[in-house]
Image (cartoon, helix red, strand yellow):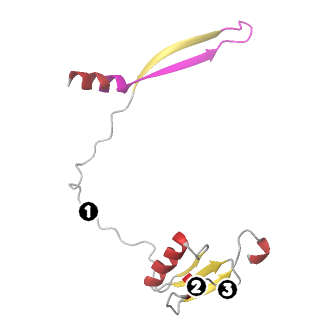
Amino acid sequence: AMAASRAVRAAALAVVLWCTVQPLQRQSISVQWAFAVSKPAALSATPGTSPIEEQPVVTPIGPESRVLVVGATRGIGLEFVRQLLDRNCHVVASHREAEPPEALRSLPSDSLSFLRMDIGDESSVG
């Protein structure tokens, strides 16, 4: 316990070194030491004891939403498409290939449309 309290006290002291340059005609540098006490750690509630606040949805994503997903052919983009379709959004899924890949075409939805676009090719974005 004693070692722990010493460690806490040592951690609470921050050594700040200020180097101040004196006027150029003297051409000397003076060093000043100062000790600053850091702020105490923030207090928090024990996990699981904080009350849950009701928070209204500010920007709902639903059937009225139209969402463009760039990079929708694989990975996180494809997963975004799936989850947005589950929320009944109209999704525009971009792809670079001549035709949408099978991963996109196999998603059953009337709310899914495709857009051939390569953001690396400015002429395809328009």
Amino acid type at circle 3 is Glu
Residue at x 62%, y 85% (from the top left corner): 114
Name the quadrant containing residue 72. Answer: bottom right
**Label 1 crowd (10 A; few <14 / some 14-19 / many >=20):** few
In the rendered image, residue 89, in percent from the top left (x then y), is placed at 49, 84
Q: Nearer the viewer, mark 1 or mark 2?
A: 2
The amino acid type found where label 1 is placed reads: Ile
Describe the element under mark 3 as helix, strand or loop. Answer: loop
In this view of the protein, which residue sits in the foreground, 1 or 29? 1
Disc 3 versus disc 1: nearer the observer: 3
The residue tagged 2 is: 102
Viewed as shown, does residue 107 lie left or right of 68?
left
Q: Is residue 122 left or right of residue 42?
A: right
Outermost residue to the right: 123
58 w.r.t. 62: above or below? above
SS at badge 1: loop
Which label's residue is closer to the chain start, 3 or 1? Answer: 1
**The magenta stretch spans which residues?**
8-28
Q: Amino acid at mark 2?
A: Glu
Question: Which residue bears the numbered disc 3?
Answer: 99
Using the image, determine if residue 112 lies above or below residue 94.
Answer: below
**Residue most extreme to the bottom:** 110
Q: Which mark is residue 52?
A: 1
Residue 24: which quarter of the image? top right
Residue at image coords 49%, 90%: 108
Q: Quadrant of the N terminus?
A: top left
Is residue 13 part of the magenta span, yes or no?
yes
Name above or below for residue 52 compared with residue 24.
below
Give the alpha-carbon distance from disc 1 to disc 2, as whole Å.
43 Å
